[in-house]
Every structure is written in structure tokens, then in C-alpha cells.
């Protein structure tokens, strides 16, 4: 079993599926999460944000096609709940951004980092219904 939650984007979805296959026994399982559009027509500001941050964002059907093309059968999938984004990620991150800004108030580069993180939080707050992380469990063919 290979498990990668929230990080396959670092190597690319298909690259991760193909490269990590060697880590599995025949018929082995892989579980990954990947950010995806929940609609085919998200708002332009949201699209622009994701085109900068992760231009490979796609819909669930496109990801399922990639899974199949890479030689896996998807045996389960579900979206990570929106509450997990806010309660477990963005709310603590928001609190940390405020403290980080204060600790580094005289450092322009640190403020730029904080601005970037704040932008992500704001985009999620405004457009979080248009994208999500999907959890995929697959078996190698």
C-alpha cells in the first residue's frame, strides 16, 4: 500500500501514479488525494488563482481517466469534507499567519509570504465550493 495525502502534485498526478507503481506488489493498492474542480465552470478569479498555483487541476472524471490510463482500477473515491479544509487546515493556518506577520513585521519578504498564504485562504473562503480534494483508492492492474 502506498499512501500520499495532499502531496502527489509535487511530482504530478500521472508521474506519481506511474513512478510509485514499482513500490506496489502485484495487485497492490495506492491511496492519494488530489485537488480537483467540483464544477466545469468555476469563477474566473478562482481559475486564475489555480492556474498560478497548480495549473494541472482537473475535474474528477479527468482524474479517473488518468487513473485508468496509468493502469489502476479505482475501487473507492470520495471528496474530503469542506469542514476539513477550514477546521483542520485554513483556520489554524489563518491563526499562524497573523502571528507570523507580527513576528516578522519588519521583513518585506516574510510579509510577501504571508500575503501569498492569505490569498490562498481568501480564495478558499470565497470559492471553496468550486474545488475540493478528492480521495482515491486504487488497485494496480
Image (spheres, rainbow, N blue to C red):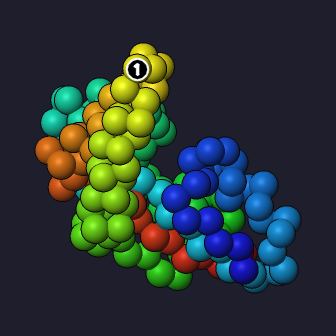
Q: In the picture, which quadrant includes the N terminus?
A: bottom right
Mark yes or no: residue 68 visible.
Answer: no
Q: Height in image: 29 above or below 4?
A: below
Q: Height in image: 49 above or below 135?
A: above
Q: Nearer the viewer, residue 9 or 93?
A: 93
- Looking at the rendered structure, the secondary structure element under dot 1 is loop
Left or right, 49 with reference to 56: left
Q: Nearer the viewer, residue 100 or 130?
A: 100
Characterize the local packing of mark 1: few (<14), some (14-19) or many (20 or more) Cα atoms within 10 angstroms. few
**Percent position (x, y) of residue 116?**
37, 30
Q: Please name the residue shown 41% across and 36% down the image.
A: 103
Q: Please name the residue shown 33% across and 29% down the image.
A: 115
**Percent position (x, y) of residue 57?**
42, 43
Q: Height in image: 8 above or below 56?
A: below
Q: Which residue is mark 1?
A: 106
**Percent position (x, y) of residue 93?**
36, 52
Q: Please name the residue shown 55% across and 77% down the image.
A: 137
Q: Height in image: 140 above or below 106?
A: below
Name which quarter of the figure residue 84 lies in: bottom left
Left or right, 22 with reference to 36: right
Residue extending furthest top? 108
Name which quarter of the figure residue 129 lies in: bottom left
Left or right, 59 with reference to 11: left
Left or right, 28 with reference to 134: right
Report how many numbered discs are placed on residues in the image: 1
Mark yes or no: residue 104 visible.
Answer: yes
**Percent position (x, y) of residue 141?**
72, 75
Name which quarter of the figure residue 81 lies in: bottom left
Amino acid at each position: 500500500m502506498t499512501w500520499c495525502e495532499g502531496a502527489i502534485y509535487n511530482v504530478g498526478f500521472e508521474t506519481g501514479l506511474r513512478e510509485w507503481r514499482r513500490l506496489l506488489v502485484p495487485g497492490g493498492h495506492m491511496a492519494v488525494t488530489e485537488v480537483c474542480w467540483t464544477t466545469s465552470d468555476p469563477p474566473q478569479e478562482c481559475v486564475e488563482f489555480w492556474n498560478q498555483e497548480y495549473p494541472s487541476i482537473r475535474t474528477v472524471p479527468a482524474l479517473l481517466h488518468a487513473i485508468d490510463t496509468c493502469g489502476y482500477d479505482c475501487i473507492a473515491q470520495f471528496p474530503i469534507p469542506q469542514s476539513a479544509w477550514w477546521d483542520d487546515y485554513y483556520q489554524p493556518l489563518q491563526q499562524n499567519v497573523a502571528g507570523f506577520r507580527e513576528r516578522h513585521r519588519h521583513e518585506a519578504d516574510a510579509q510577501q509570504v504571508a500575503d501569498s498564504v492569505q490569498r490562498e485562504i481568501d480564495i478558499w473562503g470565497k470559492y471553496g465550493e468550486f474545488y475540493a480534494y478528492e480521495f482515491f483508492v486504487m488497485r494496480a492492474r
